[in-house]
Image (tube, helix red, strand yellow):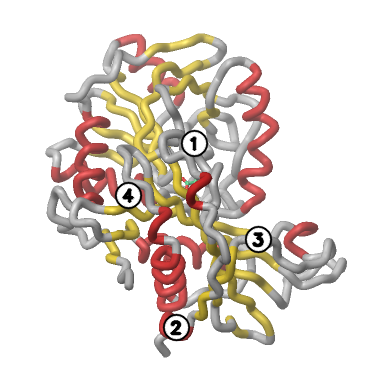
Amino acid sequence: MNVMTEISVERISKSRLTSVDFNNLGFGTYLSDHMLVADYREGKWNQPAIVPFGELPMTPAILALHYGQSIFEGMKAFKNKQGEIVIFRIQRHHQRLNRSLERMCMPAISEEMFTESLAAIVATDAKWVPTSEGSALYLRPVVFATESRLGVKISDEYKFVVLTSPVGPYFSKPVRVKVESHYVRAAEGGTGFAKCAGNYGGAFYPTQLAKQEGFDQIIWTDACDHQYIDESGAMNIMFVLNGKLVTPQLTSAILDGVTRDSILTLADDLGMPKEARKISVAELKAGFEKGTLTEAFGVGTAAVVSTIATINIGGKDYSLPPDSSSSFQQRVKKRLHDIRMGHEPDKYNWNFHVPVK
Ligand code: COI
């Protein structure tokens, strides 16, 4: 079945594109004209359709609202130097989507349906892909339980929706983060590796407390005794320690970030030794004290590569040396950008080219 040729498009009567301030996009402020919607009923996904962005008819009894069966992805589309639109690493995002769906007892989506749905919505709102430095069209596929019922059960009905949003950089300046030593994001065996809504909702309260203390984000630590670094919630975390790129190894409590994987791959191309392993808070502290911890940065689809300026450990601020264009994080960020924009060969086949009529 060729899904895309059958995806119907109901166009908006008046585009909202003229109301967008492309010089001041922020993150997730603007939603593009259209959205893609597909329903799962009686054991199968029905044909997706593209409609004007807007409200969806549903009752307040949908199971997603009560018991949290809701997962999402975060992806980006870019306009490259040839003027083509590319979606970054669609296949890897699809694989992670299905791992999240499986963990939350939700029905899988085929690679064909996922790819063609994303290509169709991006082609429909192609004019919304921004072109300024650091901007992209953020793609937000979300799947949630729509069966209307109060009993605690696995839903028999779901919606798959894809929203798109022209975005600028997630953080406008280097961030100040705090190593969390009380609250927990995820424990091994839980849902930390899945991109499920509850992981984000549960992080709000501790993050709000951290923001009141002047931090931008939390660095989450392991749920047993807060000795090892996990991730940062909206991004994975990486360090340059003793001249090597180091990042926490994946566990069931850490999101398998697509940008994380891309940077680990590009480290080889840039001749940077790398290690994915357990990193203790004590090791970071020693690295600061000895001057061997030279870079820290968050990585994610939204965050891309976000410089960390300060890490607070046990109530004490430790500052990283100022970032420079020769740092590993800047070199790898440039390489990633150049691959997406067509300035460098796409040797890993990461760019999916969207056919636009
Ligand atoms: C992403 O990087 O796409 C994320 O999901 C992080 C955040 C915006 C929820």
Q: Quadrant of residue 182?
A: top right
Which secondary structure, mark 3?
loop
Q: Which residue is mark 2?
A: 3
The three-letter amino acid code for the residue at tag 2 is Val
Q: Who comes first in sequence, dot 2 or dot 3?
A: 2
**Residue 280 placement, left or right of 266:** right
**Residue 189 placement, left or right of 277:** right
Query: In the depicted view, which residue is nearer to us: 11 or 297?
Result: 11
Measure the alpha-carbon separation of dots 1 and 4: 25 Å
Measure the alpha-carbon separation of dots 3 and 1: 21 Å
Q: Who comes first in sequence, dot 1 or dot 4?
A: 1
Q: Who comes first in sequence, dot 3 or dot 1?
A: 1
Q: Who comes first in sequence, dot 3 or dot 4?
A: 3
Q: Which residue is mark 3?
A: 54
For mark 2, does the 10 Å Cα neighbourhood hold few (<14), some (14 to 19), or many (20 or more) residues? some
Q: Is mark 4 within 8 Å of ligand 1?
A: no
Residue at 29 percent across and 53 percent down: it is 79
Q: Quadrant of residue 297?
A: top left
Residue 261: which disc? 4
Spot occupied by residue 34 in the image (x, y as percentages of width and height): 54, 63
Residue 26: which disc? 1
